[in-house]
Image (cartoon, rainbow, N blue to C red):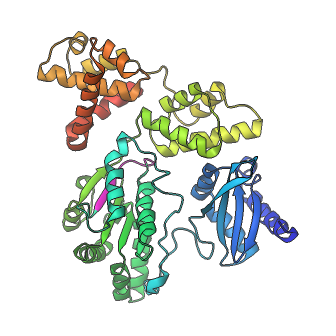
Amino acid sequence: MTQNLQQQWAQCQTILADNLTSSAYQTWFAPIVPLQYADGILVLQVKSQFVAEYIEENYIPLLSAAIIRVFGQGTRLEYRVLIDSASGAGTMLPSGASQSAAPAQQIIAPAVAANSLDPQLNALYTFDSFIAGEPNKLARAAGVAVAKQPGYTAFNPLFIYGGSGVGKTHLANAIGNQAKRLNPQARVLYVSANTFKLQFQDARNANRIPDFLNFYQSVDVLIVDDIQYFAGLKGTQDTFFHIFNYLQQSRKQLILTSDRPPVELKDIEERLLTRFKWGLSAEISRPDYQLRRSILLSKMHQSGISLSDDVVDFIAQNVRDSVRDLEGTLASLLAHSTLTEKEIDLGLAEQVVSHIVAIQPHPVTVADVIGTVAEHYNIPEKAITSQNRSKEISLARHVAVYLCKQLTKSSLSEIGFKMGKRTHATMLHSIAYVRDQLEFDPVMRQHVAQLESALTK
């Protein structure tokens, strides 16, 4: 590392420190080591992929501005993730934002040359980093299929919906990144609904609507994030309607995300809603216990954090609403541990989590599930564990087994024993039955969501 690079990075650090709290700067930027600046590319070494992802998610506009000011316009950023400190082995990750312009959500000129389209994708959002589980199984499988053959599956458009922080944007970017990797010549574009609206307004004000349409009609894979923000925007909706029709008829792929299914969108023209339903509407629901635990283990591995099983279980049991909350919890734990030089134990986890969510008073048990399900379906608790096979009792029993698997720490054998000494295979059958119903039956989804809320509140 040259003396000049050290000095330049020190200037960047000064800018960052002046614009961040002391704890944020010390946690995320002080440990960074500048490795190289050549051919307009600045390489920064970070401790883990988690650190790179967190900086990209929360601080990239500030970091970009600092780099532009010190290294100049056009500088691009790459991270080197240190995998083994003993050997010095590492891997490279490109930044999702170009330092040559406003990061990630810059307004794209419709007249841009065909061979110079920046896909605006976050390079860190891939299928490998998207942790699979039951709540996102259908959406992920459809996304993989679309990435392999965009425009040539039945999933066009692919409409991904779910609450905030469950991974919709991650999955949409993963599809785009994979499609681009498999076909580098493909014109892939990610754009937020808000950015599309601003682009349209600029084009209308400049009398360049034909150029705007031509630009978007040249895209092979169009990803529009948060489509619900088109609500009430008649001009934007009319223009997107024509783009949608052209791309769909030309066998080009459309991927849309929203915080709700098409049927619940308000102030969107009926002709657009109809087209949103042409392909597949795939929900990503709130992560269940098993998925939350898998996400934590994956993030721990990326970050080089070692947590005891009781800490992992405690976080997975209490931080329930979104993947974003889980990531924030790990980031807070890492920051507290770094600044206080304390080991991350259950006490610290309880302290941090209590500031993020309401801590559940006790873990959910099989008995809790049986009692809550029995009350919900207005049947005796003993009926669920009995040999009664009536339709009503069987349904309640299936739901109870499914919830036990999602919300408790009990094994299937333990659940089966407490459900009337039923076999492991019977438990698997009940879980599979409920999962199938959840994909297609909105009433079942509503019942299960109500029960989960009652059990985890």
Q: Nearer the viewer, residue 439 or 240?
A: 439
Residue 137 magenta-drawn?
no
At horizontal 49% and vertical 66% (from top left) the residue drawn is 121
Which x, y percent locates residue 302?
60, 46
Q: Position of residue 114 (x, y in %)?
A: 43, 85
Q: Nearer the viewer, residue 411 or 204?
A: 411
- Quarter where residue 17 is shown: bottom right
Up-down: is 53 above or below 402?
Answer: below
Q: Which residues are magenta?
A: 158-166
Q: Is residue 159 magenta?
A: yes
* Residue 191: percent from left, percent from top: 43, 68
Residue at image position (57%, 56%) is 57
Can I make out residue 261 in this image?
no
Percent position of residue 112, x then y: 46, 85
| Quarter of the image with the C terminus in it | top left
Viewer-nearest residue: 380 or 292: 292
Q: Residue at x 29, y 15 (%)?
A: 419
Q: Nearer the viewer, residue 220 or 199?
A: 220
Q: Residue furthest front?
A: 87
Position of the N terminus, as image quadrant, is bottom right
Instruction: Mark yes or no: residue 198 visible.
Output: yes
Q: Quadrant of residue 327?
A: top right
Quadrant of the image occupied by residue 333: top right
Q: Looking at the picture, does residue 64 appear above or below residue 431?
A: below
Please determine whether, in this image, residue 235 is positioned above or below residue 350.
below
